[in-house]
Image (cartoon, rainbow, N blue to C red):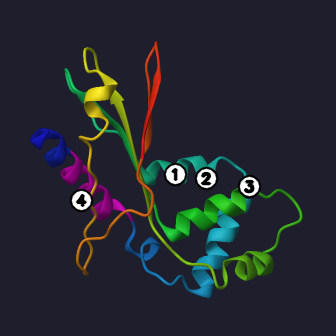
Amino acid sequence: MRYLFRLFTSFLVALCVTLPASAINTPLSDEAVREAYFLGQRHDGSYPSLMGNYIKRPPAPKSGPHIFSITFLTPFIQLVANSDRFIGNYSAQQAALDHRGQAEFVRIIVEIKLTPPTEPSLLLNQVHVQVHSQSPSLDPMISGGTFKSRSRTETSS
């Protein structure tokens, strides 16, 4: 378990260091909201390419839990994703209005896959994620997952 914690921490630090600093600044400026709108409206394949900068995929271990991916969604990339969902009747002004008054938050998604012979039930309560910032440690708003096996599905909340 210590190996997993060290691996997770090192990749999260690497992820934070490699992301552009302007993407993490909050609250987002009007210019950043406008830029996110235009990036999302391009619909030329640049959004999936941009998302690649926010997803890290560590190598698989020989056994035990495999941290398949770590996705770090900043307020900026969340706005790009929202704009990407609209085709046609959506403007930069509407994007700014939609964003105004909304809480900005960072969403971190950790996808863990199991390598044989790990049993899902053994892992249910063993994975803990802790995020640190300049303030004291932060607690996750939502934490949980679904483990699928051939015979059953188990959920942790």
69 vs 136, nearest the viewer: 136
On the image, numbered disc 1 is attached to which residue?
51
Tell me: 135 left or right of 34: left
Task: Give the residue type that dot 2 points to.
Answer: Tyr
Answer with mark 3 or mark 1, whichever residue precedes in sequence: 1
Residues in magenta, as a range: 8-19
Task: Give the residue type that dot 1 points to.
Answer: Met
Give the Cα separation between the discs numbered 3 and 2: 11 Å
131 vs 21, nearest the viewer: 131
Please name the residue shown 71% across and 81% down the image.
96
**In the depicted structure, whether residue 120 falls above or below residue 32:** above
Answer with mark 1 or mark 4, whichever residue precedes in sequence: 4
Q: Which mark is residue 47?
A: 2
Dot in front, 3 or 2: 3
Residue closest to the far left: 2
Give the Cα separation between the discs numbered 1 and 4: 18 Å
Please name the residue shown 24% across and 71% down the image.
137
